[in-house]
Amino acid sequence: MSNPQKTVFIYTMPGDWHAILAEAALKQRGHRVLRYFGTDFPALADIEFEYGEGGESLRVHTIDGSYQLSEFDVVWNRRMTAPKLPGGIDPRDRDYVSQQLRFGDASMRSLLREAFWINPYDAARNADHKPKQLQLALRNGLKIPETLISNRPDAIRRFIDTHPSVIHKPLIGAAWEEDDKTLSTYTARVRPEDLPGEALLRAAPGIFQAQVPKRFEVRAQFFGASYFALKIDSTRIEYGEMDWRLHQNGAMTDGSVVLPDAVYRACLKQLDSLGLVAGAFDFIVTPDDEWIYLEVNEAGQFIFVEQWHTAFTLFDALCDFIESGDPAFRYRQKSDPQRLADLIATTDPERISEQDASRRVVAPAGTPVEASAGMSAQAQAEAA
């Protein structure tokens, strides 16, 4: 029996292959999809919220169509981006216009709350905070590395002196342009002699963790109560002892792995504590077979998981999850599921990404307005 048609709001950014392929997969199933770019508002998207004796009419207008907000059954909070201040605004008015845009965007999110969110906005933002994740992980029965998060020089030096090998991570990933190159933050070993002066140490807090010995690593993508766990042998690549994301290559995997029952139950508790219904978990498995929790990324990348292990059918599971609207969703493998390779072949996401980058709309005054297709620095840093 076919599922009733859903109307799905994918909140994303230009060029996001995950959103492009999910839109194609959902449309193949007969669903309506709006792939909405936050940066389109207000140049390419309008809100129109009308209230009166006759009730309410809450609409969003985009170059891809107009929708009543009540039509949306599901919101996939994939890559939420902020409105973009239009050109031609008097400098004295920029702060005011920017504030009104932010509140207009937030109002639309609020009015969409009756839909099923993957993941709820407030929960997703809370999950961005690694200190909160680590606190909840301990409470939920997950093992974590010995960790210090600080900008206090004495505490940082003491922590490094106490552990034989320490790594550093930023509180949130960052990327920047330098000499025509895009540079990003990754995990790195830190020694006492690597530390800058006290002023710089105080200027930016960071995450310092005791380095954990690795037998292999695991990326486990959860949709509801179902997961796809990929075994990653980071010892096969250069710098793999630090951060396998620097050299993403399918040769690093031996295929799927099953989470121990205790780890699986703890992951469900972690999702529930954070208010999430989906997420990408990262673990280190030690030579002693201990599972060490690193983080859960509420909007983590998962295309590479299906590319590395084609027996996984993550997009098929995602579509089933969206159709279910059930936080406790359990995926049932089909005999003929939608597969990533077929979606890429029939959709051509590279071509659609180029269209995203070049699309234009004519403003009322007759002046062409170009959509912003640039990837934010933070999004560039979210390589995994």
Image: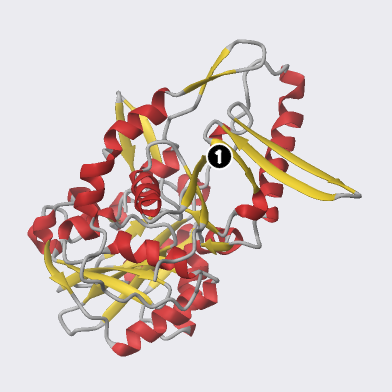
> Is 360 above or below relative to 304?
above
Task: Answer yes or no: is residue 243 visible.
Answer: no
Query: Which of the two residues, 163 or 62, is positioned nearer the viewer here?
Result: 62
Quadrant in which the C terminus appears: bottom left
In this rendering, position of residue 56 left or right of residue 379:
right
Mark 1: amino acid: Gly
Residue furthest to the bottom: 262
Mark 1: secondary structure: helix
Query: Furthest residue to the top?
Result: 366
Mark 1 nearby-residue class (10 Å; few <14, some 14–19, many ≥20)? many
* Location of residue 275 with respect to 23 vertically, above or below: below
**Residue at image coords 28%, 57%:** 191
Q: Residue at x 58, y 40 (%)?
A: 82
Residue drawn 18% across the image and 55% down it: 307
Q: Quadrant of the N terminus?
A: bottom left
In the orientation shown, which residue stands out farthest toward the right? 53
| Residue at the image position 39 percent from the left and 54 percent from the top | 26
Task: Return the x and y of residue 140 as percentages of the image width and height.
Answer: 46, 84
Q: Quadrant of residue 59?
A: top right
Residue 29: image location, x then y, percent: 38, 56
In screen coordinates, is 289 left or right of 38? Answer: left
Q: Nearer the viewer, residue 29 or 202?
A: 29
**Total numbered labels:** 1
Q: Quadrant of residue 301?
A: bottom left
Query: In this rendering, does residue 173 appear at all?
Result: yes
Question: Which residue does the numbered mark 1 point to in the structure image?
Answer: 38
Front one among 67 and 352: 67
Image x and y of residue 173, in percent: 41, 49
User: Is 141 situated above or below 4?
Assistant: below
Give percent across and percent down for residue 91. Answer: 71, 19
Say above or below: 198 vs 178.
below
